[in-house]
Image (cartoon, coloured by chain):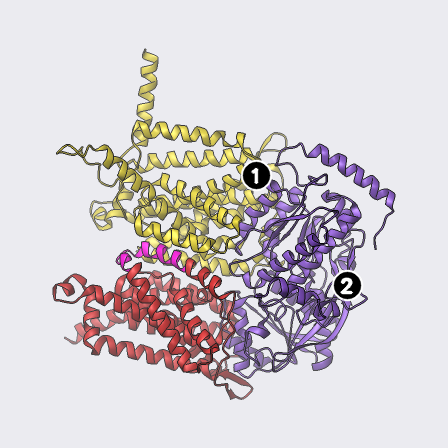
Chain colours: A red, B yellow, C purple
Amino acid sequence: MVNGINLLLQFLDSFAFIVLAAIGLAIIFGMMDVINLAHGEFIMIGAYGTTMTYNAGAPLPVAIAAGVAVTTVAGLVLERTIIHRLYDRPLDSMVATWALGLALTQAARILFGNSLNSIGIPLGAISYGQFSYSLYRVLLAGVAIAVLVAAYLVFTRTEFGVRARATIQDPETAAAMGVETGRMYTITFAIGSALAGLAGALYAPTMSVVPGMGSSFLVEAFVAVVTGGTSVLLGTTLAGGVLGSVDALLSNLYGTFVGQIGLLIVAVAILRFLPTGLSGVVETVRERRERDAA
Amino acid sequence: MSATSGVFRVVDRIRARLEGPNTIGNSRGFWLGFALVLAGAFAYPTFVSAYQAGNTALFLLYGLLALSLSVVWGYAGILSFGQVVFFGFAGYTFGIVSINLGSTLGVTLAIPVAVLIATVVAFLLGYFMFYGDVSGVFVAIITLVVTLVLQTFMAQTAGDAWTVGSVALGGFNGMPGIPNLAVGTEATSVTFRGGVFYWLVLSALVVSYLGLRVLVNGRFGYAMVGIREDEDRVEMLGYDIRRVKLAVFTLGGTMAGFSGVLYAAWGNYIDPSVYSLTFATMPVVWVTVGGRTSMLGAVLATVSIEWFRQQLSITGSEYAMVIVGLLLLGVVLLVPEGFVPFVHRKVTEFRSDPTEGIPDAPESPGEGAAE
Amino acid sequence: MSDDGVSRRRFLAGGAALAGATVAGCSGDSAAGTSTGAGGTVKLGVLEDQSGNFALVGSPKHKASLLAIEEINNDGGIMGQEIEYFDPDPQSDNQRYKELTRRMIQQENVDALWAGYSSATRETIRPTIDREDQLYFYTTQYEGGVCDKNVFAVGPTARQQLGSVLPYLVSEYGPKIYTIAADYNFGQLSADWVKVLADENDAEVVDEEFIPLSNSQFGSTINRIQEADPDFVMSMLVGANHTSFYEQKASAGLDVPIGTSTAMAQGYEHRRLNPPAMANIYAGVNYMEEVPTDRNTGDGGFVDRYYEMWPDAPYLNEEAENNYFSIYMYKKAVEQAGTFEQSEVVEALESGITYEAPEAPEGESIRLDPETHHVDHHMWVMKADDQHNVSAVEDEVIPETFLTETVGCDLTSEDEETQYTPQDYFEEAG
C-alpha cells in the first residue's frame, strides 16, 4: 500500500512542518538556553498578523511578510522586557514563558474573538493518477530548505554569524573579545521570533486560525529541537529528516494515530540512546574520521 | 520536674530529626506557628460546609502532588513533568481494581495496588532515564513526551476492546463510578467523604511533609542536595548518583501515585486530561512559585494558586487567564527563588541585627539557596 | 402531552410549599432537592465554556441560554419568580467543571443545571450529578446512549444525526462509504453508528480512519481517501485542529461529497473558511442558523432575537438552540408540576413535554421522550454549495430509537445511571 509518490510528498510535508516549527525555537534555545514555551503563541502571532492583513485586502506574500514583521516586533518587545532576565535559566524560562503563553492566548481571544476567517490555501493541487496533493504544502518543503540554507549562510558567512556562534560557544570569551553579547542575544531572539512568525504565516492558510493554534506546533517543535542536539542548524535538519520520515511512513501505512505516537516514541528513544542528539552523532563521526585521517 | 524535662528531651530529639540545613524553619517559633496552623487546618471542616471542606481537600491532595515534585526537583535537581504520569496511573489503577472487586475490601485493596503500580512505573521510567545518563533538561523533555504519549493513547481507548475486567478505560470520556476511599470490610469500615476525607488528605499531607523533612535532613538528604548542586563532585565522593536519583524519583512516584488515588476517589472519576500539557505543567508552576527548595512553599503555593484560579473562574471574567499568566510571570521574574525562601531570607536578614558590625553566624549553605 | 388534572397540581403545590418551608431551615450542604418555591428566585446554573479550546462552540450556548432567561424574565419569570442565573467560566477545563458543578449544587443550590460541551465534561460531572440527584440538562449533540434519571440529554444523538444524512447520501451518490472520525469516544461511537446505518441502508463502509484530536495535518488521510475512492465520506471530525482538513482537502482537489454530524452546525466553518472548502458538505443536524423555519429565520424569529441581544456574536450554532429550547421546556415542566422541587419537575418532564422550538416548522413541536429523557428532533440535511450558501435538502422528524427500541431504557419505571454503546447491541458495530 506504500505508494512511492504519496510517501515522498507526505515526507516533504512532514519535513517542512517540523523544520519550520522548530527552527525559531532551536535558535533561541541554542543561543540563549531559553526554553520558550510561548513559542506556539509566537507562531500564533505570525498567523494572526498574516490572516488579518490578508483579510484587510493585501495579497498573500505581503500578508506573510506582515505576519513575520509583527512577530519580530513582538519578539523584540518581549525580549527587552521579560526574556533577557531569563538567560541561562532554562528551567525558570520554561515556567515564565509558559505563563506568558497563557496570557497571550487569552489576550488574543479577548482582542480578536474565538476565530478569524481563514485564508484559503493557494496554488491548487498536483495530480498524479488517482491521487493529488496540495502544491502549496509541498512547496513549503522548499521554503524550509531555503530557510535552513539562509540561516547557514548567515551564521557561517557573515560577521554577525561568526560573532553569534562565538557567543553561543563561549559567551565570556566572546565578550572579552569585544562582542556585545547583550545585543547578540536581542538580535538572535528577534531572528528566532521572526522564524516562528514565518511558520505561523506560512501555515495560516492551511489551518483554522484560533487563539490556541500554536499548541499544534509545540510538540513537534520541542521534540525536534531536543532530538536535534547541540548543533542548531544541523540538528534541526536531521530531526526534520528523521522524525519526518517516521511520521510519514507510519501515517502512510497505519494512519495518523500511529504516526503521531511513533514520532514521539522515536524521539524518546533518540533522547535516551543518543544523549548528544542527532547532530551530536554526526559530529562524533566527523571527528573520528578526521582523527583517522590525520 | 523530670517528667517535663523528659518531654522536652523527646521533643528535642524529634526536632533534631526534623531539622537541618536542608529545610527552612528550624526554630521553635516556626514549630509553634506550624502547630497553630495545623490545629486550625484540622478544625476547618467543623466551621465550614461539607462543600468547602471537600473543595479544600482537592487543593490539599494537589499539595501532595506538589510535594512529590518538590523532593524530586527541589532537592535532587530532577525536573520532571512526569509526576502526573504516576498520578494518572495510580488513579486509573485504583478505579479499575476497586470497581472490579466491588466490595469495601476491594476498595481497601485497590489503594496499595494503585500506589504500587505508580511506584513500579516510576522505577522503570527512572531506570530508563538515569541509567542512560539522561539529565537536566532532557529529563524534563522525556517526561513531558511520555505524558503526551499517554494522553494521546488514553484518549482513544474508548470502546469495549479497552476493558480491564469489567471496567472500561473509557477513552476521552474517562472512567466514572470510582468509589469513595474506604478502609475495611463489609462488616466494619470507614468510608472517607466530606469532612472525613478532608482529614485523611490533611493527615497524609502532614505525615508526608514531616517524613520528607526527616529524610531530607538525614544522610540521604545530603546526597540528594549534593546531586542538585554538583553531580560530578558527589560522584567523585563515591556515591552512585544514578541509584540515588532513581530512589528519589521512585519515591516521588509513590507520593504522586497516592495523590492520584485520592484524586480519583475525590471526584469519583478520572480521565486522560490528567495527562494533558496544562496539568503536567501545574506541579512545576506550584513548586516554582512556592520555592523549589522549600517543601512547605510547594504546599502553600499549591493551595493558594489553585484557590485563586478557582476564584477567577467563578467570576467568569475573561481576563482570568491573563491575570494568572501575568502573575506567574511576575513571580518567576521578581521572586525567582520562590515565595517561602524569599520570606525566610527576609526574616533572617531582619533578625540578624544590621546595626552591629559583625552579622550573626551565616545560615548553613544549602538553606534558602536559589535555583 | 401534559395535564394530569388541576387537583393534582394543587396537591403538589401545597405539598411543595410545606416541604419548602421545612427544608428551607436546613444548612447549605443538604441534598440538592431543596426547594426554592416559597418566595424567592429560581436559580439556574449555566456552565458553558467562555474561554479555552471550546469557547468557539461554547460561547453561543452561553449566549442563547442568557437569551432564553432574559425572555422568560421579561415575560414574568417562571410561576411569577424571576430567574437568577450563575454562569462562571469553566475555561474548557474538566477540572474546573467538576469544582464548579459541586459549587453550583452544594453552595448555590441551583434548581437546574446546564453544563458542558464535550461528552468528557458530561462524564466528569455525572458522578456528582448522580450523587446529589441534581436535575441536569446536557445540550450538546453526542454519541447517544445515556440512560440516567438525572440527565436530560436534549441534543440529537449520533444515530439521529447520521440517520438523517447517511440514507440521503446513499440514495444520491452510492453505497461506498469511507469514514474519518476523531479518535476518541464520540468519534469511535459515531463510526460504529455509521456501520449500523450502512447495514440498514444497503451500503458498506470500505474503511475507517481515526485521527487524534491534536492532529492538524491531513496529507496522508487525503491520499488514503483518494485510494479508496468512495462514493462519499462520512466525517465526524471535531475541534479546531480538525477544521484544517476541509481546507487541505479542497486545496488537494478532493471533491468527494462529505456527510457530517459535526461540521458547519457547531463551528460554522462555512463562515470561517474560504470557499470552496465546505462545498458539497452535507450536515445532518437538528439545527443550524440557516434552518428555514418561520420561527427561526422569519422576522422577529430566533435568529433576529439572538443577534439583537448579542450583536457581535459570530454565529448561532446547533447547541445554542438546544440550550434555548430546553430552558423553555424546564419552564413548562415547572409550571406543570407547580413547584421547583427537582424530583417533581423531573416527573413533569417525564410526562411528555413538547415545545415549539425554532428547529421545527410552523405548526409542529418537538417532544421530550418521557422514558429516555431524549428529544424526538426535527432533523435537517443542510448542504453547503461552492459559495458556502447553506440550504436544506431534506427534513424529517427522527425519534430517538436506540434507547427506546433497542436497549429498552425506561426511566419512568426504573431509575438508571448508565451509558449504552451500539457495540453491545449491533453486530455490525463491533
Question: Disc 1 on helix, strand or loop?
Answer: helix
Task: Identify which residue, A195 or B202, lies in the foreground.
Answer: A195
Residue depicted at x 35% and y 60%: A272
Q: x, y (%) of residue C95?
A: 53, 50
Q: Is residue B86 magenta?
A: no
Q: Is residue A19 visible?
A: no
Circle 1 marks a residue in which chain?
B
Task: Identify which residue, B141 or B28, lies in the foreground.
Answer: B28
Task: Kindly identify which residue carries mark 1.
Answer: B51
Dot 1 crowding, Cα within 10 Å, few <14, some 14–19, many 20+: many
Residue depicted at x 43% and y 46%: B305
Position of A126 with respect to B143 (left or right) is right
Q: CA distance from mark 1 to mark 2?
A: 40 Å
Q: Which three-letter amino acid code belongs to the residue tagged 2?
A: Pro
Q: x, y (%) of residue A161?
A: 22, 74
> Which quadrant holds residue A34?
bottom left
Q: x, y (%) of residue B46?
A: 53, 29
Question: What predominant SS class does the magenta segment belong to?
Answer: helix
Task: Identify which residue, C140 or B234, lies in the foreground.
Answer: C140
The part of the chain drawn in magenta is: A83-101
Task: Kindly identify which residue carries mark 2.
Answer: C399
Q: x, y (%) of residue A232?
A: 29, 69
Position of C220 with respect to B72 (left or right) is right
Position of C418 with respect to B202 (left or right) is right
* Residue B207, placed above or below residue B302: above
Residue depicted at x 71% and y 59%: C325
Circle 2 marks a residue in which chain?
C
Q: Is residue A95 magenta?
A: yes
* Residue C180, placed above or below residue A93: below
